[in-house]
Structures are given as C-alpha cells and as structure tokens.
Image (cartoon, rainbow, N blue to C red):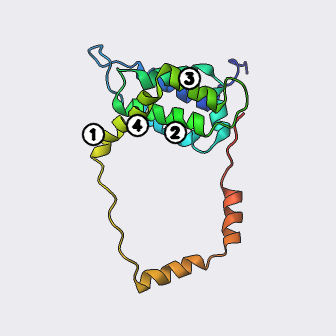
Amino acid sequence: MPSLGAPELLLHRIVRYLAVASSMKNKDGKPGYSYVQPIILKLLITWLADCPNAVQCFLDSRPHLTYLLELVSSTSSTVCVRGLAAVLLGECVIYNKSSENGKDGFTIADAISQKIGLTSYFLKFDEMQRSFIFSSVKPAQSHKPLTRSTTASMAEIEDVDENDLFSYLETSWPKCHFG
C-alpha cells in the first residue's frame, strides 16, 4: 500500500479543524457563529490540562500559537471563542515544562503580552464569564446536610482498600503519550 506522506498527529489535525471551522460562512456568505469552534476549543482545553507532553506537542507547530493569539484578539470571534482560546493559551503557559528556547512558558507569556497585551488578555476571561452562556447557567444546588444514614454510607466508602483502588487505576487508565 503506498504511503500518503507522514502521518499527522491527531492533535494537529484537531487544530486544523478549528481553523477550518472559523472560516465557515453562512448561506449568505457572511461569517457565521459556529458551535463547532467552542466544542473543539473545549476538547483542546481538556486535552492539554495538566499534561506537559500534550502542551509540548501542541507547541511543536509554531502556527498553533500564532493562530491562538489571533483567535483571542479577533473581533470577528464570539466572546466565548475568544475566552476559550485565552484559556488554552493560559494552559500553554501553566502546563509548559519545556526548557527549549522559544517554546518555554516565559516565551509564550511574552508573546501574549506583545500581541494581545496582558490587560486585554485577562479581560477575555471576564468578558466570557459575563456572557449570556455563562450567566444563564444556574448555580449548583445546595447539598443536603449529612445525616446518620449518609454518614454510614460514607464510612462504607472509606472501607475500600486504597491500595486496591490505586493499582486498579494504574492498570486501567492510560497514561498521556504523544509521538
């Protein structure tokens, strides 16, 4: 079977889909709101969270950082998209363990400061929190106070051998690997 070129990592393909989603137009040719962008951004946020290997893989392609910086500062993007892109940029700073020049957390923070401005960057979070999507979410319901029966149930949960639980989790949950 002939090769179609080097295989593309899924993470890079997802970012490419994000770029394609941002260029989609409505039937009348005007840029339209797409629900695809926030979904892809949430996926990337989940993927990069607390995983330095994923952040490194994401930053291996320099255009990813450039695209995120443009997405955060774009006036044609929705408040939600700009805010989620800002969260993703923040993960590239916080979870970045690279010491490679040009890819470390300090370099990413400098790029944010130069291209967007730190005040403007942090305002994206505030704008997103004040947006309709976030303000329409109902607060979590208050929990019932502990009673004798719920306390007994909690005691049963605590009786589980922690060593068995940890060994189960270590064998059944995959680790974060990138090639």
The residue that disc 1 covers is 132
Give the vertical position of 168 relative to 6 (above or below).
Answer: below
**Dot label at residue 45:** 2
* Distance of label 2 from label 1 (alpha carbons): 21 Å
- Report if the CB atoms under discs 3 and 2 are less than 8 Å apart: no
Q: Quadrant of residue 110?
A: top right
Q: Residue 50 carries which label?
A: none
**Is the C-beta separation of discs 1 and 4 under 8 Å?**
no
Task: Using the rendered view, name the quadrant where residue 27 is placed.
Answer: top left
Q: Where is residue 13 in the image (x, y as percent from the top left)?
A: 57, 27
Label 1 sits on what residue type?
A: Phe
N-terminal-most mark, 2 or 1: 2
Q: Could you tell me if the residues under marks 4 and 3 are in contact, i.e. CB atoms within 8 Å?
A: no
Residue 103, position as x, y percentages in the image: 66, 27
Label located before the other in sequence (3 or 2): 2
Residue located farthest toward the front when viewing the structure as drawn: 119
User: Which structural element holds mark 4?
Assistant: helix
- Give amino acid for label 4: Phe
Dot in front, 3 or 2: 3
Q: Residues within 10 Å of mark 1 (few under 14, many from 20)?
A: few
Q: Mark 3 points at which residue?
A: 111
Question: The N terminus appears in which quarter of the rendering?
Answer: top right
Q: Which residue is drawn at 34% across and 59% down?
A: 140
From the viewer's side, name the closer residue of 93 and 175: 93
Question: Looking at this rendering, what residue extends furthest in the top direction?
Answer: 29
Instruction: Tell me the residue at 67%/44% (across/down).
Output: 176
Say which mark, if any, is on residue 125: 4
